[in-house]
Image (tube, helix red, strand yellow):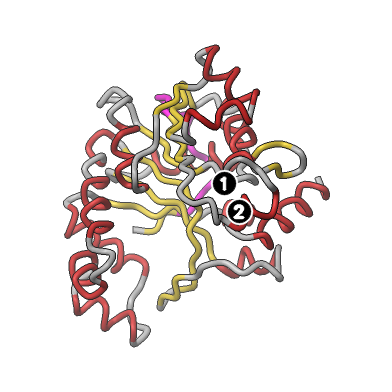
Amino acid sequence: MEKRLSSDFHQMPQRFAALVLAADRTGKDPITLHTGAACKAFAPVGGIPMVIRVLDTLSACDSVSSIVLCGPPESLHAECPELKRRIASGQVTWIPNLNSPSRSAESGLNQIPNDTPVLLTTADHALLTPSIVQNFLRASLATPCDAAVGAIRQQTVAAAFPDSKRTVIRLRDGDFCGCNLFVFKPQGRTLVKFWRQAEDLRKYPWRLINQVLGFKMVLSYLFGFLTLQQALLAVSGKSGVAIQAVILDDPRAGVDVDKVEDLMLAESILNQN
């Protein structure tokens, strides 16, 4: 189920709608507290609000035809005049966020025609570039799947940013980090309902584990036998959605801004360019 990027992809035959999750869920977010921004999405990275950086990247991609932004609350928009301008001009369609990422994603998908493939990302992906997005979308279209998830090998991130601490999934065939990049082809949208069910079980860890992977898979993971392909096949079987991993090569794809240390890293990377 792993798909590697190559340089010989054909030109993409269709365009994507982009959905950006930008909820403001807590006033105690470390980035908000550190920067004094009205919400995390408005926190400046290199002097530019994170959400504007993401929107600029998506706007620069020929394969992205429209952008839906889910959150932050409308009451905060005055704190980011550039975002307010883009919403007013129709460059960005804004909808309110709901009380969880999966519900916000489902609400966003409902704004997009069913036959349009969707790219989902987050407002804290401050280092996202057009080339990362384009490569991910090309690879997603080049393989038979209903949904694709971006991932990167932990060693790729560590080689470029040795001081960066990322969440790592350790599998038999390697250690992987998520990239906050997802593609939903029309038949893959039902994965969001599965995601919502998993969120509803988050207070019941063993029920959640059993639903998402199954007990045998959990044991395989704990004993170091589980591969990326096996994990994706398990989730595909439970959800009824064929899921493909796209392994990205740009280490910036594996860095989102969740902690103050992430913010400092992102700014240092931008200062080098």
Q: Position of residue 109 (x, y in %)?
A: 31, 32
Circles 2 and 1: CB distance less than 8 Å?
A: yes
Q: Position of residue 181 (x, y in %)?
A: 46, 47
In the image, residue 11 lies in the stretch drawn in magenta: yes
Q: Nearer the viewer, residue 145 or 26?
A: 26
Q: Nearer the viewer, residue 187 or 193?
A: 193
- The residue that label 1 is drawn on is 124
Residue at image location 76% in from the left, 39% down from the top = 47
Q: Amino acid at mark 2?
A: Val
Check the picture and name the quadrant holding the C terminus: top right
Image quarter of residue 134: top right
Q: Would you say 108 lies left or right of 167 here?
A: left
Give the answer, above or below, for where 96 lies relative to 201: above
Dominant SS of magenta comes to: loop
Give the answer, above or below, for where 268 lies relative to 74: below
Q: Amino acid at mark 1?
A: Asp
For mark 2, give the secondary structure: loop
- The residue that label 2 is drawn on is 257
Residue at image location 25% in from the left, 47% down from the top = 191
**The residue stretch that appears in magenta:** 4-17
Q: Nearer the viewer, residue 106 or 174?
A: 106
